[in-house]
Amino acid sequence: MPEIKPVSGVAQAIATTALRAQQGRMRIIAENMANAGSTSKVAGGDPYRRQAPVFTAVKIDGGMGVRMTRVDPDMSDFKTEYEPGHPSADAKGYVKTPNVNTLVEALDMKEAQRAYEANLNVIETARAMETRTLDLLKR
């Protein structure tokens, strides 16, 4: 006979996977923002390329959770600026800058924070339900 897990335990396990995924997402966003102003170390070379997390649904404790399975580079074009005296400038005087839009990254960070908080609330609510149920059973 399969083990029967309390619903709140399953909810906590699922929410925990989401917490880990959002934590990883926030780390990637922070890395993107930290490198938004970087340039190549060599003249005409490519600068930092924006990274994007990829999530996959995973089966966990009788439900479906989520996991960040990999990080893919954003293959959109780099921005260019005309700065002929810059050490990273190519032969025509253009410097490639990262394909990171800090406004988009800030909005993504806010969304990740809200998702993280929502999953914390799921865990807190599940614990409160368990506690209340145990209190009722004691009577």
Image (cartoon, grey):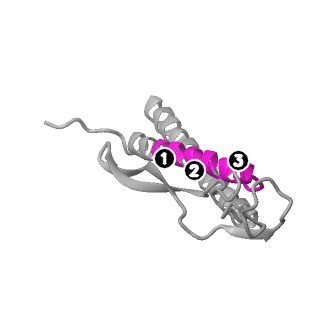
Instruction: Give the residue at the far top of this rendering.
Output: 138
The residue carrying pointer 3 sits among few (fewer than 14), some (14 to 19) or many (20 or more) residues within 10 Å by Cα, namely few
Cα distance, mark 1 to mark 2? 15 Å
Instruction: Give the residue at the far front of this rendering.
Output: 91
Task: Please give the range of residues in magenta.
Answer: 16-41
Q: Which residue is rendered at x = 52% and y = 42% of the image?
A: 20
Q: Position of residue 49 (x, y in %)?
A: 61, 57
From the viewer's perspective, is the residue at label 2 or at label 3 nearer?
3
Which residue has dot 3 on it?
41
Q: Main secondary structure of the magenta part?
A: helix
Between 42 and 7, which is closer to the camera in this rendering?
42
Task: Name the element at disc 3.
Answer: loop
The answer to which of marks 1 and 3 sits earlier in the sequence is 1
Q: Amino acid at mark 1?
A: Ala
The residue carrying pointer 1 sits among few (fewer than 14), some (14 to 19) or many (20 or more) residues within 10 Å by Cα, namely many
Query: Is residue 40 on the magenta stretch?
Result: yes
Task: Name the element at disc 1.
Answer: helix
Query: Is residue 116 on the magenta stretch?
Result: no
